[in-house]
Amino acid sequence: MTQSQAARFAVPIIANFDNSYSRLPERFFARTEAKQVTAPRLIRLNRALADELGLDPTKLERPAGVDILAGNRFPENADPIALAYAGHQFGNLVPQLGDGRALLIGEVVDTHGARRDIQLKGSGPTRFSRNGDGRAALGPVLREYVVSEAMAALGIPTTRSLAAVLTGEKVLREDILPGAVLTRVAASHIRIGTFQYFAIRGDADGVRELADYAIARHYPHVRDAENPYLAFLEAVIGAQAYLVARWMLVGFIHGVMNTDNMAISGETIDYGPCAFMDNYRPGTVFSSIDRGGRYAYANQPAIAVWNLARLAETLLPLLDDDQDRAVSLAEGALHQFQGAYDSAFHSGLRRKIGLLSEEPEDLQLIGQLLETMDRNDADFTLTFRSLAHDVNSPEGAGATRTLFNSPAAFDDWARMWRQRLASEPRHDGERRDMMLATNPAYIPRNHHVEAMIRSAVDLDDFGPFEEMVKVLARPFEEQPGMEKYAEPPKPEERVTQTFCGT
Ligand code: AMP
Ligand code: MG
Protein backbone atom coordinates (compact mmCIF):
# COMPACT_ATOMS: atom_id res chain seq x y z
CA MET A 1 0.00 0.00 0.00
CA THR A 2 1.37 3.42 -0.91
CA GLN A 3 1.19 6.29 1.55
CA SER A 4 -1.72 7.91 -0.26
CA GLN A 5 -3.54 4.59 -0.40
CA ALA A 6 -2.97 4.15 3.32
CA ALA A 7 -4.42 7.61 3.92
CA ARG A 8 -7.57 6.58 2.10
CA PHE A 9 -8.09 3.78 4.60
CA ALA A 10 -7.33 5.72 7.75
CA VAL A 11 -10.74 7.19 8.50
CA PRO A 12 -11.74 6.09 12.00
CA ILE A 13 -15.38 7.03 11.54
CA ILE A 14 -16.93 3.61 11.49
CA ALA A 15 -15.84 1.44 14.36
CA ASN A 16 -16.04 -2.35 14.18
CA PHE A 17 -15.82 -2.47 10.44
CA ASP A 18 -15.24 -5.95 9.12
CA ASN A 19 -15.49 -7.86 5.87
CA SER A 20 -16.23 -11.53 6.36
CA TYR A 21 -16.98 -12.01 2.66
CA SER A 22 -13.45 -11.00 1.73
CA ARG A 23 -12.16 -13.91 3.85
CA LEU A 24 -13.82 -16.31 1.42
CA PRO A 25 -11.57 -17.66 -1.37
CA GLU A 26 -10.12 -15.07 -3.75
CA ARG A 27 -12.19 -16.28 -6.69
CA PHE A 28 -15.39 -15.06 -4.96
CA PHE A 29 -14.58 -11.39 -5.58
CA ALA A 30 -12.14 -8.86 -6.96
CA ARG A 31 -10.37 -6.46 -4.61
CA THR A 32 -11.12 -3.02 -5.97
CA GLU A 33 -10.76 0.55 -4.96
CA ALA A 34 -13.37 3.13 -5.73
CA LYS A 35 -12.45 5.80 -8.23
CA GLN A 36 -11.87 9.19 -6.64
CA VAL A 37 -14.57 11.72 -7.38
CA THR A 38 -14.01 15.44 -7.64
CA ALA A 39 -16.68 17.13 -5.57
CA PRO A 40 -18.76 14.88 -3.34
CA ARG A 41 -21.86 16.56 -2.00
CA LEU A 42 -24.21 14.87 0.42
CA ILE A 43 -27.80 14.80 -0.77
CA ARG A 44 -29.17 12.93 2.19
CA LEU A 45 -28.00 10.79 5.04
CA ASN A 46 -30.53 8.39 6.56
CA ARG A 47 -29.87 9.30 10.16
CA ALA A 48 -32.27 6.77 11.67
CA LEU A 49 -30.62 3.96 9.73
CA ALA A 50 -27.16 5.21 10.71
CA ASP A 51 -28.24 4.99 14.35
CA GLU A 52 -29.58 1.49 13.82
CA LEU A 53 -26.23 0.49 12.32
CA GLY A 54 -24.37 1.93 15.30
CA LEU A 55 -22.79 4.63 13.10
CA ASP A 56 -22.47 8.24 14.16
CA PRO A 57 -24.63 10.29 11.78
CA THR A 58 -22.97 13.56 12.76
CA LYS A 59 -19.56 12.24 11.77
CA LEU A 60 -20.90 10.81 8.52
CA GLU A 61 -22.29 14.21 7.57
CA ARG A 62 -18.90 15.89 7.92
CA PRO A 63 -16.54 16.09 4.92
CA ALA A 64 -14.57 13.03 6.00
CA GLY A 65 -17.80 11.07 6.31
CA VAL A 66 -19.10 12.26 2.95
CA ASP A 67 -15.75 11.19 1.47
CA ILE A 68 -16.51 7.67 2.68
CA LEU A 69 -20.01 7.77 1.24
CA ALA A 70 -18.55 8.86 -2.11
CA GLY A 71 -15.80 6.23 -2.13
CA ASN A 72 -12.98 8.76 -1.85
CA ARG A 73 -11.82 7.33 1.45
CA PHE A 74 -12.51 4.14 3.34
CA PRO A 75 -13.18 3.39 6.96
CA GLU A 76 -10.43 1.67 8.92
CA ASN A 77 -10.50 -2.10 8.31
CA ALA A 78 -12.51 -1.72 5.12
CA ASP A 79 -11.66 -4.28 2.48
CA PRO A 80 -13.48 -3.09 -0.62
CA ILE A 81 -14.42 -5.84 -3.03
CA ALA A 82 -16.60 -6.32 -6.08
CA LEU A 83 -18.53 -9.58 -5.84
CA ALA A 84 -18.55 -12.21 -8.56
CA TYR A 85 -21.89 -13.55 -9.74
CA ALA A 86 -23.64 -14.85 -12.82
CA GLY A 87 -27.32 -14.85 -13.65
CA HIS A 88 -30.19 -15.55 -15.96
CA GLN A 89 -31.22 -12.25 -17.52
CA PHE A 90 -34.70 -12.51 -19.02
CA GLY A 91 -34.21 -16.26 -19.14
CA ASN A 92 -30.76 -16.25 -20.76
CA LEU A 93 -27.76 -17.40 -18.79
CA VAL A 94 -24.92 -14.89 -18.53
CA PRO A 95 -21.96 -16.73 -16.97
CA GLN A 96 -20.29 -13.62 -15.64
CA LEU A 97 -22.00 -10.51 -14.35
CA GLY A 98 -20.69 -9.40 -10.98
CA ASP A 99 -20.61 -6.01 -9.31
CA GLY A 100 -19.84 -3.83 -12.29
CA ARG A 101 -20.68 -0.56 -10.59
CA ALA A 102 -20.73 -1.43 -6.93
CA LEU A 103 -18.28 -2.04 -4.16
CA LEU A 104 -18.86 -3.89 -0.93
CA ILE A 105 -16.74 -1.84 1.44
CA GLY A 106 -17.43 -3.99 4.45
CA GLU A 107 -19.89 -5.04 7.09
CA VAL A 108 -21.09 -3.70 10.40
CA VAL A 109 -22.93 -5.53 13.12
CA ASP A 110 -25.99 -3.41 13.85
CA THR A 111 -27.56 -2.56 17.19
CA HIS A 112 -29.74 -5.70 16.95
CA GLY A 113 -26.69 -7.90 16.43
CA ALA A 114 -27.31 -8.46 12.72
CA ARG A 115 -24.45 -8.28 10.23
CA ARG A 116 -25.20 -5.81 7.43
CA ASP A 117 -23.29 -5.12 4.22
CA ILE A 118 -22.34 -1.55 3.39
CA GLN A 119 -22.10 -1.17 -0.35
CA LEU A 120 -21.38 1.80 -2.58
CA LYS A 121 -23.36 1.72 -5.80
CA GLY A 122 -21.97 3.86 -8.60
CA SER A 123 -18.45 4.10 -7.21
CA GLY A 124 -16.51 3.33 -10.37
CA PRO A 125 -15.44 0.49 -12.63
CA THR A 126 -14.46 -2.94 -11.38
CA ARG A 127 -13.16 -6.11 -12.97
CA PHE A 128 -16.81 -6.94 -13.71
CA SER A 129 -17.76 -3.71 -15.48
CA ARG A 130 -17.58 -5.11 -19.02
CA ASN A 131 -18.54 -2.12 -21.20
CA GLY A 132 -20.14 -0.15 -18.38
CA ASP A 133 -18.59 2.90 -16.74
CA GLY A 134 -19.15 1.73 -13.19
CA ARG A 135 -21.09 4.87 -12.48
CA ALA A 136 -24.65 5.64 -11.49
CA ALA A 137 -26.77 8.53 -12.61
CA LEU A 138 -28.62 10.66 -10.09
CA GLY A 139 -32.11 9.58 -11.17
CA PRO A 140 -31.77 5.84 -10.50
CA VAL A 141 -29.99 6.58 -7.20
CA LEU A 142 -32.90 8.72 -6.00
CA ARG A 143 -35.43 6.17 -7.22
CA GLU A 144 -33.71 3.39 -5.31
CA TYR A 145 -33.43 5.56 -2.20
CA VAL A 146 -37.11 6.52 -2.20
CA VAL A 147 -38.55 3.15 -3.15
CA SER A 148 -36.34 1.01 -0.90
CA GLU A 149 -37.07 3.22 2.10
CA ALA A 150 -40.78 3.19 1.27
CA MET A 151 -40.71 -0.61 1.14
CA ALA A 152 -39.00 -0.71 4.54
CA ALA A 153 -41.68 1.55 6.01
CA LEU A 154 -44.33 -0.76 4.55
CA GLY A 155 -42.69 -3.57 6.52
CA ILE A 156 -41.47 -5.42 3.43
CA PRO A 157 -38.02 -7.07 3.57
CA THR A 158 -35.64 -4.92 1.59
CA THR A 159 -32.15 -3.55 1.26
CA ARG A 160 -31.95 -0.05 2.71
CA SER A 161 -30.48 3.26 1.65
CA LEU A 162 -28.05 4.90 4.02
CA ALA A 163 -27.05 7.85 1.88
CA ALA A 164 -27.08 9.46 -1.53
CA VAL A 165 -24.26 11.73 -2.67
CA LEU A 166 -23.59 13.68 -5.80
CA THR A 167 -20.12 13.03 -7.16
CA GLY A 168 -19.68 16.38 -8.89
CA GLU A 169 -19.04 14.44 -12.09
CA LYS A 170 -21.14 13.80 -15.14
CA VAL A 171 -22.14 10.43 -16.46
CA LEU A 172 -22.96 9.82 -20.07
CA ARG A 173 -26.20 7.98 -20.78
CA GLU A 174 -28.62 9.01 -23.52
CA ASP A 175 -28.10 12.44 -21.96
CA ILE A 176 -25.29 13.85 -19.88
CA LEU A 177 -26.45 13.44 -16.31
CA PRO A 178 -25.23 14.21 -12.81
CA GLY A 179 -23.36 11.28 -11.27
CA ALA A 180 -24.26 9.96 -7.84
CA VAL A 181 -23.44 7.20 -5.39
CA LEU A 182 -25.95 5.32 -3.27
CA THR A 183 -24.84 3.70 -0.04
CA ARG A 184 -26.83 0.51 0.16
CA VAL A 185 -27.25 -1.59 3.26
CA ALA A 186 -28.18 -5.25 2.87
CA ALA A 187 -28.42 -8.39 4.98
CA SER A 188 -25.95 -9.62 2.36
CA HIS A 189 -25.43 -9.35 -1.37
CA ILE A 190 -25.54 -13.08 -2.08
CA ARG A 191 -27.85 -13.72 -4.99
CA ILE A 192 -29.17 -16.80 -6.73
CA GLY A 193 -26.71 -15.78 -9.44
CA THR A 194 -23.82 -16.05 -6.99
CA PHE A 195 -24.53 -19.78 -6.68
CA GLN A 196 -24.84 -20.06 -10.43
CA TYR A 197 -21.44 -18.43 -10.90
CA PHE A 198 -19.71 -21.36 -9.23
CA ALA A 199 -22.05 -24.11 -10.41
CA ILE A 200 -21.63 -23.29 -14.09
CA ARG A 201 -17.85 -23.39 -13.68
CA GLY A 202 -18.12 -26.87 -12.22
CA ASP A 203 -16.72 -25.44 -8.99
CA ALA A 204 -18.41 -27.73 -6.46
CA ASP A 205 -16.20 -26.51 -3.62
CA GLY A 206 -17.20 -22.94 -4.39
CA VAL A 207 -20.89 -23.79 -4.23
CA ARG A 208 -20.39 -25.60 -0.93
CA GLU A 209 -18.38 -22.78 0.62
CA LEU A 210 -20.92 -20.22 -0.49
CA ALA A 211 -23.77 -22.34 0.88
CA ASP A 212 -21.98 -22.73 4.20
CA TYR A 213 -21.38 -18.99 4.38
CA ALA A 214 -25.00 -18.19 3.48
CA ILE A 215 -26.29 -20.69 6.03
CA ALA A 216 -24.11 -19.28 8.80
CA ARG A 217 -25.13 -15.75 7.96
CA HIS A 218 -28.83 -16.10 7.16
CA TYR A 219 -30.23 -19.44 8.17
CA PRO A 220 -28.05 -20.83 10.99
CA HIS A 221 -30.91 -22.99 12.31
CA VAL A 222 -30.76 -25.28 9.25
CA ARG A 223 -27.45 -26.68 10.43
CA ASP A 224 -29.40 -28.86 12.87
CA ALA A 225 -31.57 -30.32 10.10
CA GLU A 226 -31.10 -33.87 8.91
CA ASN A 227 -30.15 -32.55 5.47
CA PRO A 228 -28.89 -29.00 6.08
CA TYR A 229 -28.53 -28.07 2.40
CA LEU A 230 -32.07 -29.18 1.66
CA ALA A 231 -33.28 -27.22 4.68
CA PHE A 232 -31.32 -24.23 3.37
CA LEU A 233 -33.03 -24.49 -0.01
CA GLU A 234 -36.40 -24.75 1.71
CA ALA A 235 -35.62 -21.72 3.86
CA VAL A 236 -34.74 -19.60 0.82
CA ILE A 237 -37.89 -20.78 -0.94
CA GLY A 238 -39.96 -19.84 2.10
CA ALA A 239 -38.33 -16.42 2.38
CA GLN A 240 -38.87 -15.60 -1.29
CA ALA A 241 -42.46 -16.88 -1.26
CA TYR A 242 -43.17 -14.55 1.64
CA LEU A 243 -41.36 -11.68 -0.05
CA VAL A 244 -43.17 -11.92 -3.36
CA ALA A 245 -46.52 -12.26 -1.55
CA ARG A 246 -45.76 -9.01 0.23
CA TRP A 247 -44.96 -7.33 -3.09
CA MET A 248 -48.22 -8.53 -4.57
CA LEU A 249 -50.20 -7.20 -1.61
CA VAL A 250 -49.01 -3.63 -2.24
CA GLY A 251 -48.95 -3.75 -6.04
CA PHE A 252 -45.17 -3.65 -6.33
CA ILE A 253 -43.60 -4.69 -9.62
CA HIS A 254 -39.88 -5.38 -9.35
CA GLY A 255 -39.36 -5.12 -13.07
CA VAL A 256 -36.13 -7.14 -13.44
CA MET A 257 -36.49 -10.41 -11.55
CA ASN A 258 -33.35 -11.87 -13.08
CA THR A 259 -31.64 -14.51 -10.95
CA ASP A 260 -28.86 -12.03 -10.16
CA ASN A 261 -31.43 -9.67 -8.70
CA MET A 262 -32.93 -12.11 -6.19
CA ALA A 263 -31.22 -12.15 -2.81
CA ILE A 264 -30.74 -15.35 -0.81
CA SER A 265 -31.60 -13.40 2.35
CA GLY A 266 -35.16 -12.82 1.11
CA GLU A 267 -34.76 -9.05 0.87
CA THR A 268 -35.95 -7.05 -2.13
CA ILE A 269 -32.79 -6.02 -3.97
CA ASP A 270 -31.75 -4.07 -7.07
CA TYR A 271 -34.36 -1.43 -7.59
CA GLY A 272 -34.18 -0.65 -11.28
CA PRO A 273 -37.22 0.12 -13.38
CA CYS A 274 -39.48 -0.98 -10.53
CA ALA A 275 -42.88 0.61 -10.02
CA PHE A 276 -46.13 0.39 -8.10
CA MET A 277 -49.23 -0.24 -10.10
CA ASP A 278 -51.95 2.43 -10.01
CA ASN A 279 -55.04 0.81 -11.56
CA TYR A 280 -55.34 -2.85 -10.70
CA ARG A 281 -54.44 -4.77 -13.83
CA PRO A 282 -52.67 -8.11 -13.46
CA GLY A 283 -50.73 -7.82 -16.73
CA THR A 284 -49.12 -4.50 -15.77
CA VAL A 285 -45.54 -4.03 -16.97
CA PHE A 286 -43.60 -0.77 -16.65
CA SER A 287 -40.02 -1.66 -17.44
CA SER A 288 -38.89 -0.51 -20.86
CA ILE A 289 -36.53 -3.49 -21.10
CA ASP A 290 -39.25 -6.06 -20.29
CA ARG A 291 -40.65 -6.23 -23.79
CA GLY A 292 -42.24 -9.66 -23.46
CA GLY A 293 -43.86 -8.86 -20.13
CA ARG A 294 -41.91 -11.68 -18.46
CA TYR A 295 -41.88 -9.78 -15.18
CA ALA A 296 -45.46 -8.46 -15.27
CA TYR A 297 -47.20 -8.01 -11.92
CA ALA A 298 -49.13 -11.27 -12.05
CA ASN A 299 -46.13 -13.30 -13.27
CA GLN A 300 -43.97 -12.54 -10.27
CA PRO A 301 -44.79 -15.62 -8.17
CA ALA A 302 -44.21 -17.97 -11.13
CA ILE A 303 -40.94 -16.23 -11.97
CA ALA A 304 -39.81 -16.57 -8.37
CA VAL A 305 -40.31 -20.35 -8.66
CA TRP A 306 -38.42 -20.41 -11.95
CA ASN A 307 -35.53 -18.55 -10.31
CA LEU A 308 -35.57 -20.81 -7.27
CA ALA A 309 -35.39 -23.82 -9.58
CA ARG A 310 -32.12 -22.35 -10.89
CA LEU A 311 -30.89 -22.13 -7.30
CA ALA A 312 -31.98 -25.71 -6.64
CA GLU A 313 -30.00 -26.91 -9.67
CA THR A 314 -26.81 -25.45 -8.26
CA LEU A 315 -27.37 -27.26 -4.96
CA LEU A 316 -28.16 -30.72 -6.40
CA PRO A 317 -24.72 -32.23 -5.66
CA LEU A 318 -25.09 -31.13 -2.03
CA LEU A 319 -28.60 -32.52 -1.61
CA ASP A 320 -27.75 -36.16 -2.22
CA ASP A 321 -24.98 -38.26 -3.76
CA ASP A 322 -27.61 -40.02 -5.81
CA GLN A 323 -28.63 -37.66 -8.58
CA ASP A 324 -32.19 -38.91 -9.00
CA ARG A 325 -32.76 -38.66 -5.32
CA ALA A 326 -31.27 -35.13 -5.29
CA VAL A 327 -33.63 -34.09 -8.08
CA SER A 328 -36.66 -35.41 -6.28
CA LEU A 329 -35.64 -33.65 -3.06
CA ALA A 330 -35.25 -30.39 -4.97
CA GLU A 331 -38.62 -30.83 -6.65
CA GLY A 332 -40.24 -31.50 -3.31
CA ALA A 333 -38.74 -28.29 -1.94
CA LEU A 334 -39.86 -26.26 -4.95
CA HIS A 335 -43.39 -27.58 -4.53
CA GLN A 336 -43.46 -25.94 -1.11
CA PHE A 337 -43.38 -22.51 -2.73
CA GLN A 338 -47.05 -22.48 -3.66
CA GLY A 339 -48.28 -23.31 -0.17
CA ALA A 340 -45.99 -20.78 1.48
CA TYR A 341 -46.94 -18.13 -1.06
CA ASP A 342 -50.68 -18.81 -0.83
CA SER A 343 -50.62 -18.72 2.92
CA ALA A 344 -48.91 -15.31 3.04
CA PHE A 345 -50.85 -13.88 0.11
CA HIS A 346 -54.28 -15.10 1.14
CA SER A 347 -53.98 -14.07 4.76
CA GLY A 348 -52.76 -10.67 3.59
CA LEU A 349 -55.71 -10.31 1.22
CA ARG A 350 -58.15 -11.24 4.00
CA ARG A 351 -56.66 -8.57 6.22
CA LYS A 352 -56.92 -6.05 3.40
CA ILE A 353 -60.69 -6.47 3.32
CA GLY A 354 -60.98 -6.57 7.09
CA LEU A 355 -61.25 -10.28 7.83
CA LEU A 356 -59.41 -12.17 10.49
CA SER A 357 -61.26 -15.46 10.33
CA GLU A 358 -61.05 -17.81 7.37
CA GLU A 359 -63.93 -19.09 5.32
CA PRO A 360 -63.48 -21.11 2.16
CA GLU A 361 -65.53 -18.59 0.14
CA ASP A 362 -63.30 -15.65 1.09
CA LEU A 363 -60.94 -16.12 -1.81
CA GLN A 364 -63.80 -16.05 -4.24
CA LEU A 365 -65.09 -12.86 -2.62
CA ILE A 366 -61.66 -11.24 -2.92
CA GLY A 367 -61.28 -12.49 -6.48
CA GLN A 368 -64.58 -10.83 -7.35
CA LEU A 369 -63.38 -7.53 -5.92
CA LEU A 370 -60.14 -7.69 -7.92
CA GLU A 371 -62.02 -8.54 -11.07
CA THR A 372 -64.41 -5.64 -10.51
CA MET A 373 -61.44 -3.32 -9.94
CA ASP A 374 -59.82 -4.54 -13.15
CA ARG A 375 -62.98 -4.01 -15.21
CA ASN A 376 -63.65 -0.58 -13.67
CA ASP A 377 -60.18 1.00 -13.74
CA ALA A 378 -60.08 1.18 -9.96
CA ASP A 379 -56.87 2.23 -8.28
CA PHE A 380 -55.38 -0.66 -6.28
CA THR A 381 -53.98 1.28 -3.32
CA LEU A 382 -56.81 3.77 -3.07
CA THR A 383 -59.54 1.13 -3.24
CA PHE A 384 -58.21 -0.82 -0.26
CA ARG A 385 -57.44 2.31 1.74
CA SER A 386 -60.93 3.58 1.05
CA LEU A 387 -62.49 0.26 2.06
CA ALA A 388 -60.94 0.81 5.49
CA HIS A 389 -62.53 4.23 5.77
CA ASP A 390 -65.89 2.90 4.58
CA VAL A 391 -65.98 -0.29 6.57
CA ASN A 392 -68.40 1.15 9.11
CA SER A 393 -70.43 3.30 6.71
CA PRO A 394 -74.00 2.31 5.90
CA GLU A 395 -74.55 0.29 2.76
CA GLY A 396 -74.23 2.30 -0.46
CA ALA A 397 -72.52 5.23 1.28
CA GLY A 398 -68.85 6.01 1.39
CA ALA A 399 -66.34 7.05 -1.24
CA THR A 400 -65.04 3.68 -2.41
CA ARG A 401 -67.79 3.26 -4.99
CA THR A 402 -66.72 6.47 -6.72
CA LEU A 403 -63.35 4.91 -7.54
CA PHE A 404 -65.09 2.51 -9.94
CA ASN A 405 -66.22 3.46 -13.43
CA SER A 406 -69.46 1.78 -12.54
CA PRO A 407 -70.16 2.46 -8.85
CA ALA A 408 -73.04 -0.02 -9.00
CA ALA A 409 -70.57 -2.80 -9.76
CA PHE A 410 -68.83 -2.01 -6.50
CA ASP A 411 -72.15 -1.84 -4.65
CA ASP A 412 -72.97 -5.37 -5.78
CA TRP A 413 -69.71 -6.60 -4.42
CA ALA A 414 -70.00 -4.54 -1.23
CA ARG A 415 -73.30 -6.22 -0.37
CA MET A 416 -71.60 -9.60 -0.28
CA TRP A 417 -68.66 -8.11 1.60
CA ARG A 418 -70.87 -6.61 4.30
CA GLN A 419 -72.67 -9.91 4.72
CA ARG A 420 -69.37 -11.65 5.26
CA LEU A 421 -68.18 -8.98 7.71
CA ALA A 422 -71.40 -9.39 9.70
CA SER A 423 -70.58 -13.08 10.17
CA GLU A 424 -67.43 -12.06 12.02
CA PRO A 425 -68.40 -9.98 15.02
CA ARG A 426 -65.75 -7.42 15.86
CA HIS A 427 -65.63 -3.94 17.27
CA ASP A 428 -66.04 -1.48 14.41
CA GLY A 429 -63.02 0.57 15.44
CA GLU A 430 -60.83 -2.48 15.77
CA ARG A 431 -61.54 -3.69 12.26
CA ARG A 432 -61.01 -0.27 10.78
CA ASP A 433 -57.69 0.14 12.59
CA MET A 434 -56.48 -3.21 11.33
CA MET A 435 -57.37 -2.27 7.77
CA LEU A 436 -55.70 1.14 8.06
CA ALA A 437 -52.56 -0.55 9.33
CA THR A 438 -52.43 -2.96 6.39
CA ASN A 439 -53.65 -0.82 3.47
CA PRO A 440 -51.23 2.07 2.94
CA ALA A 441 -52.37 5.57 2.05
CA TYR A 442 -49.00 6.36 0.50
CA ILE A 443 -46.90 4.37 -1.92
CA PRO A 444 -44.15 5.77 -4.14
CA ARG A 445 -46.37 6.46 -7.08
CA ASN A 446 -44.56 6.49 -10.33
CA HIS A 447 -45.64 9.91 -11.53
CA HIS A 448 -44.36 11.43 -8.30
CA VAL A 449 -41.11 9.49 -8.51
CA GLU A 450 -40.56 10.74 -12.06
CA ALA A 451 -41.41 14.34 -11.13
CA MET A 452 -39.10 14.13 -8.11
CA ILE A 453 -36.25 12.92 -10.34
CA ARG A 454 -36.89 15.67 -12.88
CA SER A 455 -36.71 18.36 -10.17
CA ALA A 456 -33.43 17.01 -8.88
CA VAL A 457 -31.79 16.39 -12.24
CA ASP A 458 -33.04 19.42 -14.16
CA LEU A 459 -33.31 22.01 -11.40
CA ASP A 460 -30.98 20.73 -8.68
CA ASP A 461 -34.07 20.93 -6.46
CA PHE A 462 -34.16 18.15 -3.88
CA GLY A 463 -37.27 19.47 -2.12
CA PRO A 464 -39.60 16.90 -3.72
CA PHE A 465 -37.12 14.11 -2.88
CA GLU A 466 -37.01 15.17 0.77
CA GLU A 467 -40.78 15.47 0.88
CA MET A 468 -41.35 12.04 -0.61
CA VAL A 469 -38.90 10.42 1.78
CA LYS A 470 -40.71 12.07 4.68
CA VAL A 471 -44.25 11.18 3.59
CA LEU A 472 -43.38 7.60 2.67
CA ALA A 473 -41.77 6.98 6.05
CA ARG A 474 -45.29 6.86 7.53
CA PRO A 475 -47.33 5.18 4.81
CA PHE A 476 -50.24 4.18 7.01
CA GLU A 477 -50.99 7.63 8.46
CA GLU A 478 -52.95 10.29 6.64
CA GLN A 479 -50.72 13.35 6.58
CA PRO A 480 -52.57 16.63 6.17
CA GLY A 481 -51.21 18.67 3.29
CA MET A 482 -49.67 15.64 1.63
CA GLU A 483 -52.84 14.40 -0.08
CA LYS A 484 -51.34 14.69 -3.54
CA TYR A 485 -49.01 11.79 -2.77
CA ALA A 486 -52.01 9.56 -2.17
CA GLU A 487 -53.62 10.48 -5.47
CA PRO A 488 -53.34 8.38 -8.60
CA PRO A 489 -52.02 10.13 -11.70
CA LYS A 490 -54.29 12.20 -13.85
CA PRO A 491 -54.42 10.85 -17.40
CA GLU A 492 -51.76 13.30 -18.55
CA GLU A 493 -49.50 12.43 -15.59
CA ARG A 494 -49.60 8.70 -16.15
CA VAL A 495 -46.19 7.06 -16.52
CA THR A 496 -46.32 4.09 -18.84
CA GLN A 497 -42.65 3.10 -18.92
CA THR A 498 -39.78 3.07 -16.48
CA PHE A 499 -36.11 2.91 -17.40
CA CYS A 500 -33.14 1.36 -15.62
CA GLY A 501 -31.01 4.30 -16.59
CA THR A 502 -27.94 2.61 -15.18
P1 AMP B 1 -28.61 -4.74 -12.88
O1 AMP B 1 -29.28 -3.97 -13.95
O2 AMP B 1 -28.39 -3.95 -11.64
O3 AMP B 1 -29.25 -6.03 -12.56
O4 AMP B 1 -27.17 -5.04 -13.45
C1 AMP B 1 -26.84 -6.08 -14.32
C2 AMP B 1 -25.34 -6.15 -14.49
O5 AMP B 1 -24.86 -5.03 -15.20
C3 AMP B 1 -24.56 -6.19 -13.19
O6 AMP B 1 -23.45 -7.02 -13.39
C4 AMP B 1 -24.13 -4.75 -13.03
O7 AMP B 1 -22.99 -4.63 -12.21
C5 AMP B 1 -23.85 -4.36 -14.46
N1 AMP B 1 -23.96 -2.91 -14.67
C6 AMP B 1 -25.10 -2.18 -14.68
N2 AMP B 1 -24.82 -0.87 -14.89
C7 AMP B 1 -23.48 -0.77 -15.00
C8 AMP B 1 -22.58 0.33 -15.22
N3 AMP B 1 -22.99 1.59 -15.35
N4 AMP B 1 -21.26 0.04 -15.29
C9 AMP B 1 -20.81 -1.21 -15.15
N5 AMP B 1 -21.61 -2.27 -14.94
C10 AMP B 1 -22.93 -2.07 -14.87
MG1 MG C 1 -28.50 -6.37 -10.50
Image: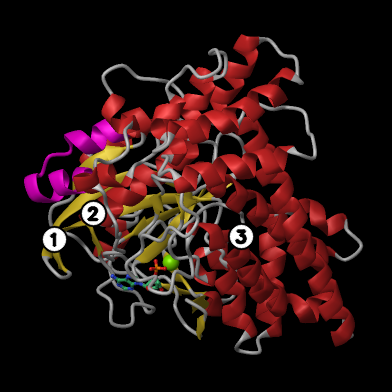
Q: Marks 1 and 3, Cα distance to the nearest angstrom?
A: 35 Å
| Local secondary structure at mark 2 | helix
Quarter assignment of residue 470 = top left
Mark 1 sits on what residue? 177
Where on the image, by quarter, is ligand 1? bottom left
Of the residues shown, which amino acid type is indicated by label 2? Gly
Image spot of residue 456 (x, y percent): 15, 45
**In the rendered image, which quarter contains the N terminus?**
bottom left
Mark 3 sits on what residue? 301
| Local secondary structure at mark 3 | helix
Of the residues shown, which amino acid type is indicated by label 3? Pro
- Mark nearest the camera among 1 and 3 is 3
> Magenta span has 158?
no
Image spot of residue 423 (x, y percent): 76, 21
Mark 2 sits on what residue? 139
Of the residues shown, which amino acid type is indicated by label 1? Leu
